[in-house]
Image: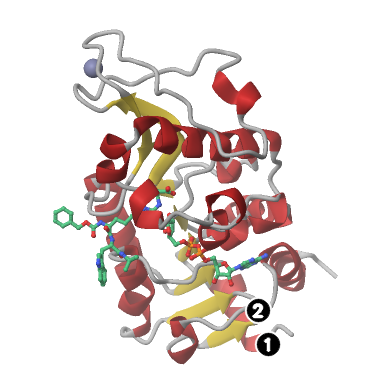
Amino acid sequence: MIPDTLIEKLQNTQHLVILTGAGVSAESGIATFRDTLTGLWENYEAESLASEFGFLADPALVWGWYEWRRNRVLRAKPNPAHHTIAQLAKQVEKLTLITQNVDDLHERAGSCDVLHLHGSLHQPRCLICEEPYSFPEMTSLENTGDTECRIEPPRCHLCDGPIRPGVVWFDEQLPAKAWQLAQEACKNCDLMLVIGTSGVVWPVAQLPYLVAQKDINLVQINPDITSLNAVAAYNICGKAGEVLPLLYAAAFDKA
Ligand code: BV8
Ligand code: ZN
């Protein structure tokens, strides 16, 4: 399943970039972004919930959706994919971890300096003055069971503005510093693993192409076909939580 040439490249990489999407958290029980919009949220479009416009139109629905998602993240645990990525950082010269995910499972598995290009569920802030908001211990999480939940967003203690999730919504700019570091890493790396993303959201979706067009080795790990299959040097069809431990063992476990 894993070519020897790839194992060798991993053993000799000087700068490894890893880009993850929702697929890396799937085996932790966190619905992928596409799957999130099924079940009780199936009547909504991503852009109507994950946008400032959607929040302004119905703050309680959007805040409730994010609390529903945060509740699941708090109950979830990092899976072997997250743990293996954290271990890889100790084996290679330099690793830049870039994620589109808004959960903290990479950090909880031990990864540091994670570049969250789409923000985080865990860093809400005031919509008006941007004052950071700290979740009280037991917040409104109790009532985010498996029914659609509308929860009024808390208010800012400075200006009484509504608290919004700390994520990057559609039509919002990516965090400038993280985006700059991510692009630089892709331009300077010698190997890139793209794990668990459908690669449809821009501008993050362009990062693997930055690498491929420089003839640097691009590796995709995904059970499904994506547009990256056409440009990746290696397409490993499988689940991140199963493939990554095999790749790590083949490259770094001393026989
Ligand atoms: C911006 C945070 C500009 C919020 C997210 C038309 C064409 C091109 C672009 C656009 C367009 N119209 C609009 C745009 C721009 C837009 C965009 O790209 N839209 C798309 C839908 C076409 N982008 C933006 O708006 C961005 N901002 O462009 O600003 C600008 C310019 C000037 C001035 C102001 C602004 C901001 C985009 C950020 C949106 N926020 N997340 C939240 O989470 O609620 S995006 C969200 O969806 C995720 O963060 C993620 O990035 C994205 C896609 O999700 P994936 O992670 O890929 O997950 P998905 O479910 O899609 O796929 C999962 C994959 O895992 C699958 O392939 C599956 O096979 C695989 N998988 C499943 N199980 C496993 C697995 N893999 C491995 N192992 C497993 N076990
Ligand atoms: Zn405020």
Q: Residue at x 60, y 79 (%)?
A: 224
Residue 149 percent coordinates (x, y): 54, 33
Q: How far across and down, in percent of the image, does residue 20 sit?
A: 51, 60
Q: Residue furthest top?
A: 157
- Report which quarter residue 227 is drawn in: bottom left
Q: Which residue is label 1 attached to?
A: 3
Under circle 1, the secondary element is loop
Quadrant where the C terminus is found in the figure: bottom right
Question: Is residue 246 placed above or below 45 in the rendered structure?
Answer: below
Task: Tell me the distance, in whole angstroms, between the alpha carbons under discs 2 and 1.
Answer: 7 Å
Residue 117 visible in the displayed image: no
- Residue 108 image point, x, y percent: 62, 38
Task: Give the SS element for disc 2.
Answer: helix
Numbered marks: total: 2
Q: Which residue is mark 2?
A: 7
Q: Nearest the camera: 255 or 177?
A: 177
The front one of 203 and 150 is 150
Q: Residue at point 71% right, 66% down?
A: 248
| Side of 88 where 168 appears, left or right | left
Instruction: Residue at 68%, 87% (x, y): give it.
Output: 3
Quarter of the render that holds ligand 1: bottom left
